């Protein structure tokens, strides 16, 4: 049996969670980071981390790409396109044992649906420039997969939370805000459930679109109130979105309002979410103390 090698472009929050989840399933698990300091920390944890800045690809990155049987791409594209396709297209096409590719995208590609439901069959209608770039990258990866003859799975992620990145941390740091925009809802997803979904997709060599999101879209102010209650802290006062001081990017997130369905996770991948709503996820972070996060 051919040894399996997983290589993850972008060992960030989601990429590291996947790497830790997948270590026992592959002969090697590696990926890229932007600094040698971070690479050294991850190598100490058994992850074959290499430096990749998106501007050039070292011989080591090229070699790791050519050896990979499974590739996950989680680096966001820019106006110049997807850096992995730009720099490593040839290495991917020449990877002899390459079997599968997973691309981590965003539910932002669906645009605004006025609070209505979308699912994997909904056509993208991106509003922001970053979501337009994501749609373009999704198409480029699909084309590359067809050219190479391997399945490509597009994982569209909703708002990611987990250890160190959650409403509890914001409440305890005093930075939590309860912005209220009537009718506004968001979906969320715990980083551990992302790792489970992508690992399942890789194991099954799945293809097509998968919305990696929880079961209950809800108002963002409710999440903050729930976290404050768990922590025994007073809920921050409600702030009217219309008059709130926000960065243009923060305000743009509220310009898209939709409920995202995740039927294919269970139906096609057999994935059962560990944290089907924010309540289970935040409660687990509080109960085990992992809401504080850890160095990584």
Image: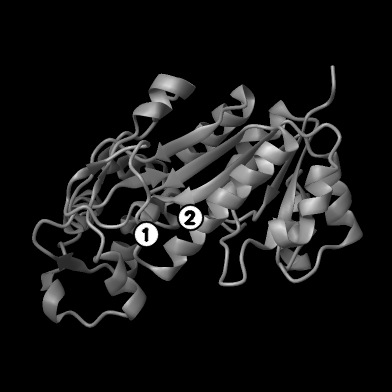
Of callouts 2 and 1, the N-terminal one: 1
In the rendered image, residue 285, in percent from the top left (x then y), is placed at 38, 45
- Give the residue displayed 55% in from the left and 31% down from the top: 207
Where is residue 286 shown, x and y percent of the image?
A: 34, 46
Q: Quadrant of residue 86?
A: bottom right
Q: Is residue 184 visible?
A: yes
Q: Name the disc covering residue 135, or none.
A: 2
Residue 224 sits in quarter: bottom left
Residue with the mark numbered 1: 126
Q: Which sits in the foreground, 237 or 261?
A: 261
Residue at x 83% of width, y 55% of height: 61
Asked whether, in this view, residue 171 is left or right of residue 142, the answer is left
- Find residue 145 and report its horizontal and vertical position in percent: 67, 39
| Distance (Cα) linking label 2 and label 1 | 8 Å
Residue that appears at 30% across and 41% down: 283
As rendered, which of 202 and 12 lies closer to the eye? 202
The spot of residue 118 in percent (x, y) is 27, 42
* Residue found at x 22% / y 69%: 177
- Mark 2 touches mark 1? (CB < 8 Å): yes
Residue 174 shows up from this direction: no
Quadrant including the C terminus: bottom right
């Amino acid at each position: 049996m051919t040894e399996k090698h997983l290589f993850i472009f972008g060992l960030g929050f989601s990429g590291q969670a996947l790497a830790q989840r997948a270590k026992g399933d592959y002969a090697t698990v590696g990926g890229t980071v932007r600094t040698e300091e971070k690479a050294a920390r991850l190598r100490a944890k058994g992850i074959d981390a290499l430096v990749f800045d998106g501007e050039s690809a070292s011989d080591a990155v090229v070699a790791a790409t050519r050896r990979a049987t499974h590739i996950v791409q989680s680096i966001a594209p820019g106006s110049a396109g997807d850096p992995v396709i730009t720099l490593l297209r040839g290495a991917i096409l020449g990877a002899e044992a390459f079997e599968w590719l997973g691309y981590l995208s965003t539910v932002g590609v669906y645009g605004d649906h006025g609070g209505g439901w979308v699912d994997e069959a909904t056509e993208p209608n991106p509003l922001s420039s970053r979501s337009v770039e994501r749609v373009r990258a999704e198409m480029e990866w699909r084309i590359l997969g067809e050219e190479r003859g391997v399945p490509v799975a597009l994982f569209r992620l909703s708002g990611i939370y987990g250890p160190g990145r959650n409403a509890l941390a914001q409440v305890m740091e005093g930075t939590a805000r309860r912005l209220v925009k009537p009718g506004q809802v968001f979906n969320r997803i715990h980083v551990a459930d992302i790792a489970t979904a992508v690992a399942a997709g890789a194991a099954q060599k799945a293809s097509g679109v998968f919305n990696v999101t929880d079961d209950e879209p809800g108002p963002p102010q409710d999440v903050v109130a729930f976290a404050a209650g768990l922590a025994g802290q007073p809920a921050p006062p409600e702030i009217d979105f219309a008059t709130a001081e926000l960065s243009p990017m923060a305000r743009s997130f509220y310009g898209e309002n939709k409920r995202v369905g995740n039927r294919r996770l269970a139906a096609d991948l057999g994935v059962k979410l560990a944290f089907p709503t924010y309540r289970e996820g935040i409660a687990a972070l509080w109960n085990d103390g992992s809401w504080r996060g850890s160095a990584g």
